[in-house]
Image (cartoon, coloured by chain):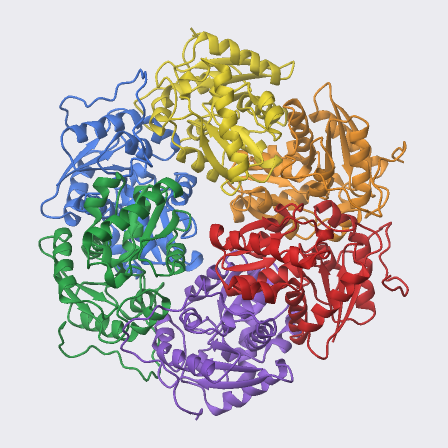
Chain colours: A yellow, B blue, C green, D purple, E red, F orange
Amino acid sequence: MKIQLIHAITGINSAFLEYETEVLASYKRPGTEIRIRKIDNGSASIESHFDEYLGAVDTFRLVKQAEAEGFDAVIVTCFANANVDPSREIARIPVIGSGMAAMSYASLLGHRFSLIMASESSDYRHYHEASKLGFKDKLVSVRRTEFRVLDLLKDRDKTLAGFLVAARQAIEEDGADVIVPACFGMIGLAHEAQEILGVPVIDPAGAAITMAESLVRMNLSQSKIAYPFPPEKRRTIDIEPKTERELA
Amino acid sequence: MKIQLIHAITGINSAFLEYETEVLASYKRPGTEIRIRKIDNGSASIESHFDEYLGAVDTFRLVKQAEAEGFDAVIVTCFANANVDPSREIARIPVIGSGMAAMSYASLLGHRFSLIMASESSDYRHYHEASKLGFKDKLVSVRRTEFRVLDLLKDRDKTLAGFLVAARQAIEEDGADVIVPACFGMIGLAHEAQEILGVPVIDPAGAAITMAESLVRMNLSQSKIAYPFPPEKRRTIDIEPKTERELA
Amino acid sequence: MKIQLIHAITGINSAFLEYETEVLASYKRPGTEIRIRKIDNGSASIESHFDEYLGAVDTFRLVKQAEAEGFDAVIVTCFANANVDPSREIARIPVIGSGMAAMSYASLLGHRFSLIMASESSDYRHYHEASKLGFKDKLVSVRRTEFRVLDLLKDRDKTLAGFLVAARQAIEEDGADVIVPACFGMIGLAHEAQEILGVPVIDPAGAAITMAESLVRMNLSQSKIAYPFPPEKRRTIDIEPKTERELA
Amino acid sequence: MKIQLIHAITGINSAFLEYETEVLASYKRPGTEIRIRKIDNGSASIESHFDEYLGAVDTFRLVKQAEAEGFDAVIVTCFANANVDPSREIARIPVIGSGMAAMSYASLLGHRFSLIMASESSDYRHYHEASKLGFKDKLVSVRRTEFRVLDLLKDRDKTLAGFLVAARQAIEEDGADVIVPACFGMIGLAHEAQEILGVPVIDPAGAAITMAESLVRMNLSQSKIAYPFPPEKRRTIDIEPKTERELA
Amino acid sequence: MKIQLIHAITGINSAFLEYETEVLASYKRPGTEIRIRKIDNGSASIESHFDEYLGAVDTFRLVKQAEAEGFDAVIVTCFANANVDPSREIARIPVIGSGMAAMSYASLLGHRFSLIMASESSDYRHYHEASKLGFKDKLVSVRRTEFRVLDLLKDRDKTLAGFLVAARQAIEEDGADVIVPACFGMIGLAHEAQEILGVPVIDPAGAAITMAESLVRMNLSQSKIAYPFPPEKRRTIDIEPKTERELA
Amino acid sequence: MKIQLIHAITGINSAFLEYETEVLASYKRPGTEIRIRKIDNGSASIESHFDEYLGAVDTFRLVKQAEAEGFDAVIVTCFANANVDPSREIARIPVIGSGMAAMSYASLLGHRFSLIMASESSDYRHYHEASKLGFKDKLVSVRRTEFRVLDLLKDRDKTLAGFLVAARQAIEEDGADVIVPACFGMIGLAHEAQEILGVPVIDPAGAAITMAESLVRMNLSQSKIAYPFPPEKRRTIDIEPKTERELA
């Protein structure tokens, strides 16, 4: 099984790529091959709808390319299901966001979950996504850590500590019984955090990869009634698959 | 007062532009100056999320340009509030969609409103927009006419007739008491349709222009807590205002 | 355009009338003529459903009178849409409440708005109105200032100060991103408060007058399916338009 | 125990009064004394908000009078909880509507109930009442019979037949599993209808009287936090208890 | 009228039985005969779904026995409507839980009610029950006292004191305007607590008995469309009525 | 990885067991070992809450046994998450229902899904489960096929044909864009049905096994804040693991 993971941001450096590859490897099945790509044109990170839309066209190209090359599923990240709705329209293979996967598991394991996100992100995107997926009543809070997305990997211990502070507040003050790190920059912390917090902590990378594998295993994809192919018409922007290209 | 109307599509011809100018003139106040622009890069019309996102970058440029040139408000259309959320983040002046304006008036005038849209559009974008605005329980149905967006102006009588069929079904079968033509291609039909149907029919152009005028009059704009400016970061796509440019 | 503003209370003195006329003038369009009337029989102010219902019959008379005299729209106030539902049933011209107008704008400009009301009012009327209009999830709190409705104009500075305290709590503790003074006695504070608070503040008078103007401009009124004319029957209370009468 | 039943309408003739007394007697407890009053000023029947408000002041007088004379509880009818909210504010003894009582039992006995109402009434009042009480998701439909409120008692068999037609549609087409005659003019049909329909049918009179008895028995009344006494102020309409007066 | 009250727990001692009989006597009508039974097999008390399900089979036997012996209605308690749904399926006579009865009255008397429960119970069962009954928006909080269910009657004064502390927090911090002791071990405190707190306090025993009496009085029972008899099939567990048996 | 699948029913014959083993094998990963057990005491099938509760104690025993023997996860079926809530309380390893797994995938793949169930089941259990999981707005209908649960495997072609009729109605009349066979007796039809219907069809067996595998892979289980261990107390029913036992 071949899964394409698309970062809808430009700000992925080789250190994160290496770290991410390790984290994904710890969750994926033996037979699963994961290819990681980032977009060339867009924002370094996504902390707003603006950043999401800015990287849309390049995301579409990578989705089309993956489908053309025979990939079985596509994961688009950052967390907030960025560009997932339009990407689902143009593809036949399943396209999922890491956020929808993580929230889906969270809703199965408890009654009220909280998202812990980076400091400058706007929370309304998460509330709207949760609402679209049916989790409005289950999402009790969206809390901030003190870090910006792009700094999260610079100091893993500080990131974990900040995450734990916000998570404890979510548990004690908001009544959360499941915690979700709502940023792909916070992958790889779940096991440790879960041990300390005593409640389920859902890793966005683990959620995305196991969800994608499960859909492929069941031969499932997004409903084409729900996400119909856009009808043919004149469009001045081309999203045909690129020629071969690799991550820097 | 100067208002910038942005078509987030490329498929606006001079015939529609002329028609639209007339319709807008019939709703706007004497002192209001309206400038109409369409994007250069994107889709000919919007019938999917894909089409919406494709025109995003060019929409942002026109928003920034309008603000830089001292416009007081921006209307983005097609109907489904396309690119409005990210555009609100990058602007200080009010940015509204024609759909949010029309649904807002509809919700004030009755208990259950229906949207009548072009034939190939996907309805879920409308349900999600209505849900975000608080109108989930008021929006009783989204019905299709038999025309595609791009054909709507070719034969106005046929368009009106098709619209009336769908609107009557909405009233009789879905219990709608207010009707909204959910496509900017269907502007200019409201008075006639209202006369025939006997229920309020909200023109998207009239709704957008009066709403924009009212917000400017009250010195109101989107909350910057709700739609914060995206934090500074590296972005490879430039949306700075273009140099002077006119509609073809 | 002629708009009738009805105070469904008796406690309007000449000082407030003068102040109110000024505030309305700052929002209305050049061609709009506003006539202000108060009821003769009812309560000095509305802080309960009881007070609302007490002034209903006289409100109906003023609505009928306005329609008979060719007015284009009616605004009924105090804030909580007092007597608006029954008034809409008996009129063909649009009848709106200042509360529904203000909440409608508020819901368009942010994600969560708060109402700031006078001290002794009961908040449930506001929650029910918001719920009827679709804004249940957007109205995050109803907060009190330390003043009673009838005292609000005695000391404008103290009123503003009290308002700001409550508004700041709404923003910081309840997560509000838009603020609405939920009392017609608090009109004329919005610009100043918005400057200080940094979030949109919706003036109920401005909201009511621009909404009424917009509806008239679009030739819209409440749906007569939603608000049907009461069928003919024996009624012992007459609400036919009064003979000429002026505010004391 | 003494219970005051107030018809917030003027159109109660002696035939109905006699019939109603019998029906109430079949539901009440041996020790319960029921006094029936109608208002002097208002509408002959209630089929709109307008009719409700028109009889409000006289309803208030009867509520105050009942409390002053030592009654234990007040039932206000017609069905749609007419004038109940303001009446609860001015009284310490429990005030209930027949609609809230009937819907409350209905929600306990099934998953989806329907209201069957007279032909010309507007249904939105019922939806809003149901929503205020928490029954929005349980109320699956409001259906009309072919009769007007004032004609309902003229031909009991025809009324029953019309009621059964609408009730069967509610069961088969709307999925209702409990039926509520939503008009006080349709009291006394429940046992017969239930026998025929095979689902619970809630009599508004039975619901109101047993609910009032139960509240008194438990020493319960409306919360004065929820329905606070209106603060003292100048009011030009007097609702003090009337001197002795009897139904014609 | 004969009403069977079933404790779906084994931990009822003679002291509580005596106390309970007194409390029920203070609420029931003169002609009502109440028989109290506890199950033989299950948990000493219910503080989890597990405890509820453990006593289900024996509860079913007592329900069938009551119906076979001509009882008119069945109350199942503990508070959280334990085993009520399946018991309603197997019986024709009305089966109610004390929790549904109490929450039903609470929702009629105010806008926001709180449940006060014993210390170790899990609150989600209450939220789900409230949600099923339509009271999701009315139930503002579930608060704990410092006692376990089985200890509640050991020291009535301490129980009352603990209850009052939690109730006051519910009123002041959560905005509750009606209070419900959410444990059958806390019956008999309502009058005293209501006197002290100044808001309605609903006794679960009073609520259950008056609700059962009212349903019988109106000849109402659960809808058999909503709670159909389980179709015949092979079952290895017999729930036929037991032979005569008395409480120890 | 070892997964215990528990049928909370007694009516599993060897033919179904063989069929089921094949279906599960087609979904599970190479390293996953699945043990299937049915309860000894309960109902032959589950078409009511009564049937669910009847098999609860034996289900608990099998859950405890699986945990004691080192299994990694438990699936309880029939579809409607039977006995899952209490089973989650007593276990540390993840316990899931096939229904929650299937609805979770369904909600990710479309906007509105329908459940197709056997003929005599009651639909309210499904609506309540969907509501608890957050899918109230996504579950648009529950439709019946013409078969009873126990007959479903007798004639696979007839079952499939009946399923397709109901599924097509769900798609065309209810607007469903994803279909879920809501009965474990209908496993193994999904691929064929999806091919014919053109929308995603979620196999309950596939959903359960891939969900269980994913949770184990991520080291996740139900939150013990959400599903706390029942506190120690006297219980007369023992659910300790049984000694070795095999399916007949």
Residue at the image point whose x is 19% and y is 73% from the top: C65
Give the answer, above or below, for where A23 lies relative to B70. above
Q: Is residue B36 visible?
A: yes
Looking at the picture, tell me which residue is in the foreground, C143 or B41: C143
Q: Quadrant of the N terminus of chain D?
A: bottom right
Left or right of F59 in this view: B48? left
Quarter assignment of residue E39 = bottom right
Give the answer, above or below, for where A161 lies relative to F16. above
Looking at the picture, tell me which residue is in the foreground, C199 or E132: C199
Image coordinates for residue C128, horizontal then vertical, percent: 40, 58
Give the answer, above or below, for where B83 lies relative to C49. above
Image coordinates for residue C112, horizontal then vertical, percent: 37, 44
Looking at the picture, tell me which residue is in the foreground, D122 or B223: B223
Q: Is residue F16 visible?
A: no
Image coordinates for residue F4, horizontal then vertical, percent: 77, 31
Residue at the image point whose x is 56% and y is 53% from the top: E165
